[in-house]
Image (spheres, rainbow, N blue to C red):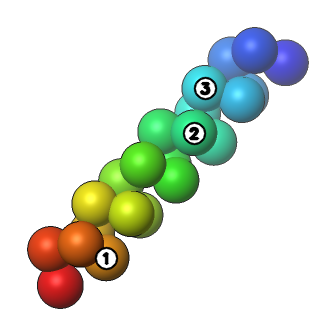
Amino acid sequence: MIFHYERAKTKWFFKRLNDAIY
């Protein structure tokens, strides 16, 4: 469960980063 949560958070982080760049 923790691992899945970390993956989701990382995915969200990169999505925010991508939105910030573009």
Task: State left or right for residue 15 relative to residue 17.
Answer: right
Quote the CA–CA distance across marks 1 and 2: 15 Å
Quote the CA–CA distance across marks 2 and 3: 5 Å
As drawn, the label of residue 6 is 3
Quarter holding the N terminus?
top right
Q: Is residue 12 above or below residue 22?
A: above
Give the residue drawn at x 28%, y 60%: 17
Task: State left or right for residue 9 relative to residue 15.
Answer: right
Q: Closer to the camera: disc 1 or disc 3?
A: 1
**Residue 6, image x and y in percent?**
60, 26
**Residue 11, image x and y in percent?**
50, 49
Query: Between 5 and 16, which is closer to the camera in this rendering?
Result: 16
Q: Neighbour class for label 1 at 10 Å: few (<14), some, many (≥20)?
A: few
Task: Quadrant for residue 16, please give it.
Answer: bottom left
Give the residue drawn at x 24%, y 72%: 20
SS for callout 1:
helix
**Residue 5, image x and y in percent?**
71, 29
SS for callout 2:
helix
Q: Mark 3 is on which residue type?
A: Glu
Task: Quadrant for residue 8, please give it.
Answer: top right
As drawn, the label of residue 19 is 1
Task: Quadrant for residue 22, please give it.
Answer: bottom left
